[in-house]
Amino acid sequence: MARRRRALAASAAAERQRAARIVRRAADTARDAARHPADYPPPGPFRPSTWRSPLRGLWLTSVLAVVLLVGLTIVAVTGLLSYAAYDPLLGSNDTTPGANLLKFYLFTWPTHPSWWYRVDQGVHITLGLALLPIVLMKLWSVLPRLFAWPPVRSLAQILERVSLIMVVGGVLFEFATGILNIQDFYVFPFSFYTAHLYGAWVFIAGLVVHVALKFPRMVHGLRSRSLRRELRTPLAGTQPEEPDEAGLRAARPAAPTISRRGLLAAVGGASLTLAGLVVGQSIGGLARRTSLFGPRGLSATAPHYLPVNRTAVSIGLTAKEVGPAYRLTLAGAHQVVLTYEQLRALPQQVVELPIACVEGWSYSARWTGVRLGDLARMAGMPEPAGALVESIQQVGSWRAVTLSDGQVLDPQSLLAVTLNGHILPWDHGYPARTIVPNTPGVHNTKWVNKITFLRQV
Amino acid sequence: MTGAGWVRRGSGWVRRWYGANPLHLLTLLAAFALAGYAVHAVMAAGEWIGFAEWFAVAIIGHDLLLFPLYSLADLSLRHLLPGGSHGRLPEVKPATRGPFEPARPALTPPRTAAPGITPPRTAAPGIAPPGIAAPVIARPAVATAVAQPAAVAPAWPPLLNYVRIPVIFSLLLLLTFFPMILGLSAPELHRASGLGTGPYVWRWLGVTGTMFAISAVTYALRTRRAR
C-alpha cells in the first residue's frame, strides 16, 4: 500500500516536472520570438518555405526590370506627349484645370510631322499592351517580398514600402484604366482622362524613386548571370540562382518545371501575341486584317469608311439640323453665314491625313474641303491667334475645341466636306468637320456649325 | 567642429534613427511630394474616393486574388499532368532549429552556424567553420531532383508546358479583352462606334484553338524526336 502510494507520488512528481519543462520551453520560445520575430513568421505566405519556385531570383527580376524600365519610360513619355497634344493651355481645351504645376512641360503642339500623334498613340497603346505580361511576371518574381517577415524593420523600410504602393498600385491602375478605356468599358467612377493623367503622375513618382533606390541592385543582378548562357540552358540544366541580399531566391527551391529561357520565351511570346493581335489597327493596309483584338481593327466596313468614336445617333443628330436649315457661322472681325451649298462652292483642297484616336487606332484618308485659313480671311481675320470650333452636338465632351494659330493657318487644315471622295457620312460629321494634321482624333470636330476666329486664346 | 563633421554626425544620427542614409529619405520625400500633388489634383477634381478605391482594388485584386488563383491553378495542373511530376516538391530537410522555421534557412542557417548574408545575432565563432556558405545546403538536393527525370527517361516528354503555355496565353487574352470578348462593353462600344462586340468571342476561341494546335504539333514533333 505504502509502496503504491510512493510510486503514485513519484509519477505525479515526474508529471509535474514534465509539465514544468513544457511550460519553460514555451516561455523560452515566446521570449525568443519576441526577441527575434524574423524567425517566427506566421504560417502561409509569411514562411519563406512557402515560396518554392526555383526560377525566382535577382537575375530574373533584374532582366524583367530593365525591360520595364525602358518600356514603361516610353509608355509614360508618349502618354505625357499625348496630353500635350490636347493643347490644354488653349482656351476651353483644359479638362484638368487642377493639374497646374503638372503642366510645366507643355508646349504648343505642332502640326508637323502629320504622323507624329498617330505614331505616339500607336506606340503608347501597343507597347502598353506588350508590357502587361512583363509587368505581371515582374510582380510574380517579387511577390514573396510582400510577405517578408517581420513586415517592418525600420522607418526607412516603411517609407519604401509606401512608395511601392505608388509603383505597384500605379502600374496596375494605369494598365487597368487604359485597357478598359480602349474597349469603351467605362466602369470606373471617374473621368478616364483625369484619372489616367493623375494616376500616371503617382506612378511616375513611385517609379523614379524605385529606380533610384534599386538601380545598383538591378545592375548587380544583370551581371550575376550571362543571358547568353541562360538562353542555351535547357530544363535539365536549370539550377536555382545564387541566394541574394534581396531575398528573391527561394529558401528551399523546388525542382524546375520550365527552364529560365522557357519562361523568358513564354513571357516574350505573350507580349508579342498581345501586341501583335492589336497593332494592325495603328498601321493600316493589310496589317489591319491581323488586328483581331483591336477595338477598331477589323471593323471597317465599306472601303471608303473609317471607324468613329462618336456616332450621329449617340448625339441625337436630326435631319432637321443637317438639312437645308444648316448654316455655318464664321465669326471674326465680322460675321459670315454660309449655307452648305455656299460652303461647297468655295475653293476646295485635297489632303491625305490620318484620323488618330487617343485609343490607339488610326486610319489615313483623303479629305476634301476648305482651308481653315481661307475661312479666317473670309471672316476678316487673316492672322488669328486661334479658333474656337463648335459642333451641332449640344452636350458631351469635345463638342467645342480651341485650335492654335499654327493649326488654323496650316495649309493642310481643312473644314472637310468629303471623305475618300464621298460626301461625309453622318457619323463622320456631315455636313462639315475639321481635319487638322497631327491632332488627337477628338480635336477634329464633327458636325461643325460655328468657327470663331480669335484675337487671343 | 568643422562643417563636414556636423554633416557626418547628422548623417550618422539619421542612419541610426531612420535606418538608411539621408539621401534615401530625401528621394522618398521628393516622390511623396510629387505623388501628393497629383492626389491633391484628384481631390480638387472631386474624384478621389473612386480613385483611391481603384488603386486599392488594383493592388488587392492582383496580389491577394489574381496571384493566389493562378498559383493554385498552376499547382493543380502540375499535379495533374505528366511533367508536373518532376515538379513535385522534393523534400529538402530544412535547417530548422526550433518549432518554427527560421526566416531564411538557406541564407541564415541555424543561429549558431555559419554567418550567411545576415550576420548572426549570437556570435558563435568556432561552433561552425565560417566558410560554409549557405547555398550548399539547398543545391545538391535540387541537382539530384533535376537529374531524376533524365535518369527515368520517359517515353513521352513532359506534357505540362505544352498545356500550360497555351492556357496562359488564352487566359491573358481573356484578362485583357474580357469587356469585348464577353460583350460587356457592347452598349458603349456600339454607341461610340456603331460596331458590335459579337466577333470577339469567336476570335478569342479561334486564337486559343490555334495556340493549342501549335502546341500539339510542337509536342508531336518533340515526341518523335525523343523516340
Image (cartoon, helix red, strand yellow):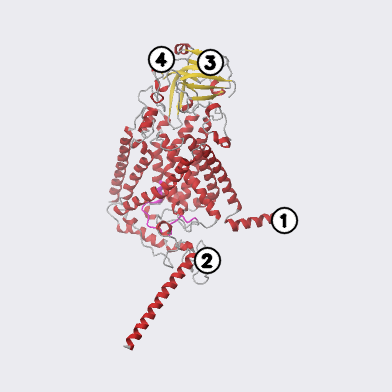
Q: How many marks?
A: 4
Instruction: Indicate the secondary structure of the residue bearing disc 4.
Output: loop
Per the image, label 1 sits on a secondary structure element best described as loop
Of all chains, the one bearing label 2 is B
Above/below status of A455 relative to A212:
above
Q: Are marks 2 and 4 in contact (CB under 8 Å)?
A: no
Q: What amino acid does circle 4 point to? A: Gly
Label placed on residue A323: 4
Secondary element at image label 3:
helix
Residue carrying label 3: A374
Q: Which numbered disc, 2 or 4, marks the residue closer to the eye?
A: 4
In percent of width and height, residue B202 lies at 30, 35
Pointer 1 residue: B2
Residue B66: % across, % down: 39, 47
Q: Secondary structure at mark 2?
A: loop
Going by the picture, which residue comes out furthest to the right? B1
Main SS, magenta residues: loop
Question: Residue B128: image x %, image y %?
Answer: 49, 70
> Can residue A422 be seen?
yes
**Chain of residue at mark 1:** B
Please identify the quadrant where the C terminus of chain A is shown. Answer: top right
Q: Which residue is mark 2?
A: B121
- Determine contact: label 1, label 3, CB under 8 Å: no
Name the residue type under label 2.
Arg
Mark 1 and mark 3: Cα distance apart in space: 72 Å
Span highlighted in magenta in the image: A246-264
From mark 1 to mark 4, how far is it between C-alphas?
85 Å
Among the 4 quarters of the image, the one containing residue A44: bottom left
Query: Is the Cβ of the residue at disc 3 closer than 8 Å to that at disc 2?
Result: no
Three-letter amino acid code at the position of disc 3 = Asp
> For the residues tagged 3 and 2, is the chain the same?
no
